């Protein structure tokens, strides 16, 4: 069977791997087709396509746009669009500037609170839409981490990673740096203007079962597909959102939301999402894109 993954990230947003390393790793896991869907940027798409040709992996142009609809924060995936579309590029550029501005406010606050932060180092990364993880990682090093261990009261032998740190300090610091968003309707329209398809990412992460009507409303606004098979979904959620997709005549996509592996030094039996996610694809035969 030819495996595929339509939701991955590189270091051009908040992933850990370059497009080339992502493609190479995908090939070792047997993926024949992937989409690079970085947050609010398509900077790595050209590279991913070129390296895909080099390593024999088909790469679908993709992007994951942060959006809002009513009180919900939703992620809209775009696929197979013209990635030179001027309106799309302009909107993504504005979102990137907004995020960097809020990230600088976060850094200023951390400096004010006497954390050791090297702003130049943070912004030397390749990312055009850096996540808060790039700042959080600096708090897991040196004197910063010694302070973290005292404030968090980390137990001896406890594994403590970036997501744990962000959760602990979210209200104190990281809430100051929200994601830059546009409306869900605008994202769908932009993707369609660029001749692409719009898909709601991992609905079970942002919506509960009782909010099924949000999918119906977005369908009426042009939504094309639903990422019902997701690394964020339990089997129960995959079952439910597949049925919702069928009910509203949306095509179903599968995506792991791969960002990178867990550190090998943690010694965990499963340290990459792809080891888990492939089981979800064993009987997924229809490929909509």
Image: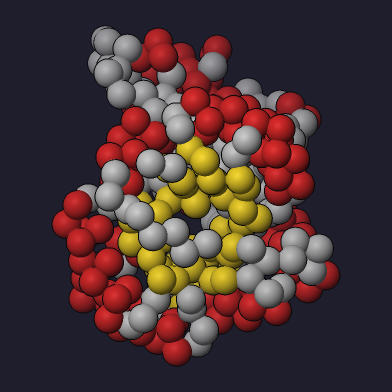
Q: Note whether residue 128 is visible.
A: no
Image coordinates of residue 164 in percent, x first then y, are 37, 33
Q: Give the residue displayed 61% in from the left and 57% down from the top.
A: 63
From the viewer's perspective, is 123 left or right of 36? right
Residue 274: x %, y % from top left: 39, 34
Q: What is the total number of numbered labels drawn onto the structure image?
A: 0
What is the quadrant of residue 61 in the picture?
bottom right
Residue 276 visible in this rendered orientation of the protein: yes
Please give the name of the residue rendered at 45% of the width and 89% of the height, measured from the top-left corner: 220
Q: Is residue 173 left or right of residue 53?
A: left
Q: Residue at x 52, y 62 (%)?
A: 289
- The answer to which of 35 and 163 lies nearer the viewer is 35
Residue lying furthest left in this view? Answer: 236
Q: Is residue 29 above or below residue 74?
A: above
Residue 161 occupies quadrant: top left
Residue 122 horizontal side relative to residue 159, left or right:
right
Nearest the viewer among 239 and 53 is: 53
Establish if 222 lies above or below 281.
Answer: below
Q: Nearer the viewer, residue 34 or 179?
A: 34
Residue sitting at the far front: 1
How is the structure coloured here? secondary structure
Residue 19, image x, y percentages: 66, 36
Q: Residue at x 45, y 29 (%)?
A: 29
- Residue at the bottom extreme? 220
Q: Nearer the viewer, residue 2 or 204?
A: 2
Image coordinates of residue 224 in percent, x first then y, are 48, 76
Relative to 132, residue 142 above or below: above
Q: Quadrant of the N terminus?
A: top left
Name the quadrant containing residue 13: top right
């Amino acid at each position: 069977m030819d495996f595929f993954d339509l939701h991955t990230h590189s270091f051009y947003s908040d992933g850990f791997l370059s497009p080339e390393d992502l493609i190479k790793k995908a090939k070792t896991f047997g993926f024949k087709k992937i989409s690079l869907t970085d947050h609010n940027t398509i900077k790595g798409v050209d590279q991913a396509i070129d390296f895909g040709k080099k390593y024999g992996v088909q790469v679908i142009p993709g992007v994951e746009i942060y959006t809002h609809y009513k009180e919900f924060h939703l992620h809209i995936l775009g696929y197979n669009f013209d990635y030179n579309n001027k309106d799309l590029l302009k909107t993504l550029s504005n979102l990137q500037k907004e995020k960097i501005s809020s990230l600088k406010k976060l850094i200023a606050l951390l400096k004010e609170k006497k954390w050791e932060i090297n702003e130049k180092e943070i912004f030397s990364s390749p990312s055009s839409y850096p996540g808060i993880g790039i700042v959080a990682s600096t708090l897991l090093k040196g004197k910063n981490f010694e302070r973290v261990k005292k404030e968090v009261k980390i137990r001896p032998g406890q594994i403590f990673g970036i997501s744990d740190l962000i959760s602990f300090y979210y209200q104190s610091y990281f809430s100051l740096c929200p994601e830059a968003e546009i409306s869900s309707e605008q994202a769908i329209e932009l993707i369609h203007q660029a001749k692409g398809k719009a898909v709601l990412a991992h609905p079970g992460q942002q919506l509960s079962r009782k909010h099924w009507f949000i999918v119906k409303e977005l369908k009426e606004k042009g939504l094309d597909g639903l990422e019902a098979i997701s690394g964020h979904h339990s089997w129960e959620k995959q079952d439910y959102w597949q049925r919702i997709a069928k009910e509203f005549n949306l095509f179903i996509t599968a995506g792991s939301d791969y960002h990178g592996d867990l550190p090998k030094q943690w010694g965990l039996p499963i340290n990459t999402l792809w080891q888990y996610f492939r089981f979800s694809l064993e009987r997924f035969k229809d490929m909509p894109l």
